[in-house]
């Protein structure tokens, strides 16, 4: 999560864009991203230079000859704002647009129509200075930065397009464990968060694959696929992948649910958080998907799509709204039946509703399934996630409670889950029981709650205690009243100059004259 000083720095840069006349949030994000990309290109270049010098090997720079002046470290130190503006607008920007300009790469396709929109030298100078002060050390920080920028888009979430938190993406990738020969797709990729995390997992857990020329070629050219209908997101995603060392990801401008998507049994792993609550016309949806489940709901149609595009034996880890788990319409039951009866549903992980805050409070779950085409579900593993490491309110502050390590550990050792009871946080449910419950996949349908019997005292004893407390209250009130009266008498005697005893007698005579003895 972006917090504290870093958040304030980003907000100040955003304000420079806003006051300078760039008020469309997507334009701000795009221009911000271009400059971040230029800065990170220089940082990557510096690391490679240092490694080559250390190893004593030849280094082929991406900034040949005169292009050295297009490096962030060079132009940020130019003498005047006007000189910097001239170099960036007429040199740096055309340079990055022509990177990977083979006409066929994702980067070439989606940078081609990019436009430099910063209007003045003074504004560019302030933005460059602000971005230069951002400290973004690791992949998580860069991912969180993108998420924070995207959260500023006023329309984010209105069509169910929620930015998936980085730690949830990492958990899902860790659960399905991408392999060096996988072909991975996110059909609703956004800024490519799932693909970025998948490539990082492979680098961390299968580093030896990069020593194999065939696997290295597969990684750079044939492993990663992503579709989206927002060209800004495609540009951001392409830059994101290139910065993370994936030379040629297969990123396409495509409506994944339409007839234009003809993919069939092509991929081995789907990682996705597809749009929720969308509703499409039947004419806009591929007929193959409607055969699986006739519906206009995007969350159901995407599940049908995943089943179609996966190869036999392919896996999927996807986020769905809770309604998918228990919806009673024919379409809801149909897609759950398809996954359970004709494929293998491995797990249902129920997440708390605050996971997507502050963008949305929707309750969601993660489905993990394997395409078999011939069934195979004998039991389904359920997990009730109660905490994800952050508070479940709009602030989303980091807390100590976090079920994610436990989820990953338990899913990696399902044999040990066999004897768990329904009162625990995770347990198995036989497929026969799920079918008997009309394919309901909500965890509350199967979780058992243990109620502790509370024994109360008899009515007579409780009433006796109440009467005793009442008597104590009245006694305390009497003491308090007497104390207040004496304090008042003392005050009156002091201001009147009359002795306390005389004042007491005079007051008593006023209250009850017959009782005063001369």
Image (tube, helix red, strand yellow):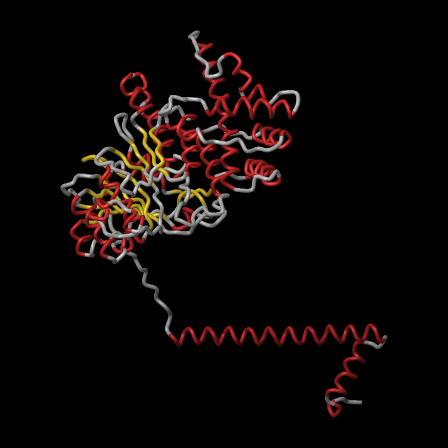
Q: Position of residue 499 (x, y in %)?
A: 82, 76
Q: Nearer the viewer, residue 502 or 162?
A: 162
Relative to 11, is 510 above or below?
below
Q: Quadrant of residue 483?
A: bottom right
Q: Residue at the spot x=64%, y=26% of the render?
A: 81
In the rendered view, does 389 fall on the left or right side of 489?
left
> As drawn, which residue projects farthest toward the top?
56
Q: Quadrant of the C terminus?
A: bottom right
In the rendered view, does 139 fall on the left or right side of 117?
left
Relative to 461, is 137 above or below?
above
Q: Is residue 254 visible?
A: yes
Q: Position of residue 104 (x, y in %)?
A: 35, 25
Q: Residue at the spot x=32%, y=34% of the render?
A: 174
In the rendered view, does 108 fall on the left or right side of 339?
right
Q: Position of residue 339 (x, y in %)?
A: 21, 46
In the rendered view, does 155 fall on the left or right side of 121?
left
Q: Is residue 39 visible?
A: no
> As drawn, which residue projects farthest toward the right?
497
Q: Quadrant of residue 258?
A: top left
């Amino acid at each position: 999560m972006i917090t504290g000083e870093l958040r304030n720095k980003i907000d100040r840069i955003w304000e420079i864009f806003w006051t300078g006349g760039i008020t469309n949030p997507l334009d701000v994000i795009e221009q911000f991203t271009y400059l971040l990309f230029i800065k990170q290109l220089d940082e990557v270049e510096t690391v490679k230079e240092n490694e080559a010098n250390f190893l004593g090997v030849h280094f082929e720079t991406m900034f040949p000859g005169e292009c050295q002046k297009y490096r962030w470290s060079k132009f940020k130190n130019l003498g005047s704002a006007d000189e910097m503006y001239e170099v960036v607008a007429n040199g740096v920007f055309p340079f990055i647009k022509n990177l990977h300009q083979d006409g066929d790469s994702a980067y070439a396709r989606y940078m081609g129509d990019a436009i430099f929109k910063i209007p003045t030298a003074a504004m560019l100078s302030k933005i460059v200075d602000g971005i230069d002060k951002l400290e973004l050390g690791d992949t998580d920080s860069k991912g969180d930065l993108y998420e924070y920028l995207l959260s500023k888009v006023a329309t984010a979430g209105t069509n169910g397009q929620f930015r998936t938190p980085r730690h949830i993406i990492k958990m899902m990738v860790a659960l399905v464990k991408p392999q060096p020969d996988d072909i991975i797709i996110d059909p609703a990729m956004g800024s490519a968060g799932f693909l970025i995390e998948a490539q990082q997992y492979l680098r961390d857990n299968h580093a030896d694959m990069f020593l194999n020329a065939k696997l290295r070629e597969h990684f750079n050219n044939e492993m990663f696929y992503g579709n989206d209908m927002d060209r800004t997101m495609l540009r951001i995603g392409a830059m994101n992948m290139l910065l993370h060392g994936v030379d040629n990801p297969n990123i396409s401008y495509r409506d994944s649910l339409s007839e234009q998507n003809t993919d069939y049994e092509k991929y081995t792993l789907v990682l996705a958080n597809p749009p929720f609550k969308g509703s499409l016309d039947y004419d806009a949806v591929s007929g193959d998907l409607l055969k699986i489940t006739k519906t206009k709901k995007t969350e159901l149609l995407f599940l049908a799509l995943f089943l179609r595009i996966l190869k036999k034996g392919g896996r999927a880890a996807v986020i769905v709204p809770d309604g998918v788990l228990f919806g009673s319409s024919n379409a809801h039951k149909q897609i759950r039946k398809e996954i359970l009866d004709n494929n293998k549903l491995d797990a249902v992980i129920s997440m708390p509703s605050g996971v997507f805050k502050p963008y949305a409070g929707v309750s969601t779950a993660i489905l993990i399934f394997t395409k078999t085409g011939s069934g195979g579900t004998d039991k389904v593993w359920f997990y009730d996630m109660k905490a994800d490491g952050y508070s479940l309110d709009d602030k989303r502050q980091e807390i100590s409670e976090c079920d994610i390590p436990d989820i990953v550990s338990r899913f990696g050792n399902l044999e040990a889950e066999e004897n768990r009871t329904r009162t625990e946080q995770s347990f198995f449910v036989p497929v026969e029981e799920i079918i008997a419950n009309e394919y309901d996949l909500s965890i509350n349908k199967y979780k058992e709650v243990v109620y502790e019997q509370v024994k109360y005292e008899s009515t007579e004893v409780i009433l006796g205690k109440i009467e005793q407390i009442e008597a104590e209250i009245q006694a305390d009130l009497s003491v308090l009243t007497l104390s207040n009266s004496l304090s008042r008498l003392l005050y009156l005697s002091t201001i009147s100059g009359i002795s306390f005893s005389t004042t007491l007698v005079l007051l008593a005579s006023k209250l009850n004259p017959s009782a005063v003895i001369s």
